[in-house]
Image: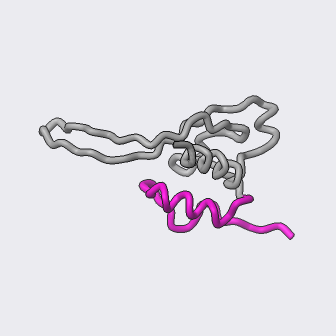
Amino acid sequence: MTQTLPPTIPGLSEHTATDALITALRTLPQRPLQFHLHGEVLVPAGYHVTEVKAVTIEAMDCGGQANTWRETVIQLMDGSAEDAQAGFMTNRKFLAIYDRVVGSD
């Protein structure tokens, strides 16, 4: 039986907390993980996750207003044509990478 999945995970928006993203990915572990920008696939199938970073930004805008925020940065690299034939990484595989990064202290 083939499962039909919605194009995006419901409840996720452009600015999504890392915990919300990870929780949503865990609900559909076999789903292919695709990254989109303006409705288009941003990174083709076969990509590699090269880094997962927790970053604190300390910035000053042109009006002199200081601001600080945290971001999670997922760095991706295009794979080879051979990698692309295997399709998109599953949520499960991404989460294994993420869990390894978070668990390393």
As for residue 3 lying within the magenta part, the answer is yes
What residue occupies the far front of the structure in this picture? 105
As for residue 101 lying within the magenta part, the answer is no
Residue 11 in the image, given as x and y percentages of width and height: 51, 67
- 74 with respect to 30 (left or right): left
What residue occupies the far top of the structure in this picture? 80
Q: Residue at x 57, y 48 (%)?
A: 103
Q: Quadrant of residue 82?
A: top right
> Magenta region's main secondary structure?
loop
Please give the range of residues in magenta.
1-30
Q: Residue at x 16, y 36 (%)?
A: 62
Q: Quadrant of residue 86?
A: top right
Colour basis: one colour
Above or below — where is 12 with respect to 74? below
- 60 with respect to 39 (left or right): left
Q: Residue at x 74, y 67 (%)?
A: 4
Residue 10 in the image, given as x and y percentages of width and height: 56, 67
Above or below — where is 84 with respect to 92? above
Residue placed most toward the observer, 94 or 5: 94
Residue placed most toward the observer, 41 or 86: 86
Query: Which quadrant of the figure contains the N terminus?
Result: bottom right
